[in-house]
Image: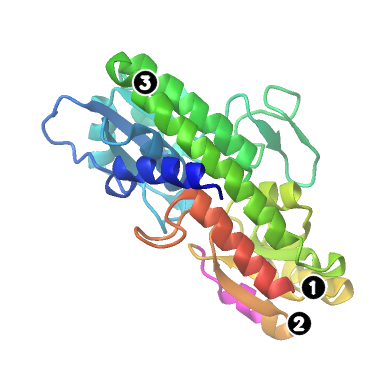
Amino acid sequence: MSARIALLFAAVLAFGLLATACGGGSGGERDGRLMVVVTVAPVGALVSVVAGDDADVRVLVGPGIDPHDYEPRAADRRAVERADVIFRNGLGLDAFLDRALKDSNGAIVTLSEGLTLRAPDEEPHAAGGSHSHEGEDDPHTWHDIDNDRAMVRAIAGALAAADPAHGAAYEARAAAYDARLVAVDAEIRALIATIPEANRKVVTNHDAIGYFLDRYGLRFVGAVIPGTSTQAEPSSKDVAALVATIRREGVTAIFADASVDPKIARQVARDTGARIVDDIYGDSLGPAGSEAATVDGMLLWNARKMAEALR
């Protein structure tokens, strides 16, 4: 990473990323700042880095919480009603918020709109095409750095529109983080390049990191929990078929999301002799202060874990 990019990114952190990433608002009195609500932790981290101290950011589904089975609280609904801007991921991931949004007067921004989406087991395609209906595409869009860069631009535009007085600051922080993401992309490519071609086969706890695998040339072999949600239950037949596939393909490691119970994944690892890595991040981020507490940090964390296990 160049010294210039490092300085830019340090400036971004100085604007209070760590203080806002876990949700600054508590539903109390306004302090004059823009009130922003974000549905899920990865999107919240992107919003927080752009907002800095110029907006009060509350993230509903914090780090380490599975958004697929989240139930909103009364405090969440009150925060939505009071928010000036609400950022949601879309694609069904934050459907828990849909009812509360009907009572909101804030600007609602769905960040997956306009992104290049992937449908499980299909080629990536542009949003708005024949496969892009809400809930049908893979909602874990933040695992592709091009998507993150596009979301950061959209976040800066939405915040600047709602709060023109701080528009230049939002844009500056977005530009600094964009440079950081470009640098991280290069670091990840270098890490993946260390994995022998024959070993670039991945089994996961559920299909949550497909964007990452597609971007960096790793092959998705299968998942313990079928589909992109954690709500499905694998049958004994599903598990037996996965075990046979792992043996046939010579898969050396199974990667389990830190926010999902790895019990079945560990059993599959024991049955196949594959290594189990149960601390990657698919649906969420790491705890505040950890290496994986930001989107760029989480992507690097996952890349390092995969490179270590598959080498």
The location of residue 282, given as percent across then percent down, is 56, 55
What segment is highlighted magenta in the picture? Answer: 260-267
Name which residue type carries label 2: Thr
Check disc 3 and report the residue beneath it.
Answer: 168
**Above/below status of 272 relative to 232:** below
Q: Which mark is residue 60?
A: none
The location of residue 156, given as percent across then percent down, is 43, 25
Name which residue type carries label 1: Val
Name which residue type carries label 3: Ala
Q: Earlier in the sequence, mark 3 or mark 1?
A: 3
The location of residue 198, given as percent across then percent down, is 87, 68
Which of 147 and 165 lies nearest the eye of the viewer?
Answer: 165
Residue 230: image quadrant is bottom right
Identify the element where label 1 is drawn: loop
Residue 44: image quadrant is top left
Q: Which mark is residue 251?
A: 1
Q: Is the C-beta separation of discs 2 and 1 under 8 Å?
A: yes
**Above/below status of 17 relative to 198:** above
Q: Earlier in the sequence, mark 2 or mark 3?
A: 3
Residue 167: image quadrant is top left
Q: Residue at x 68, y 35 (%)?
A: 117
Check disc 2 and report the residue beneath it.
Answer: 272
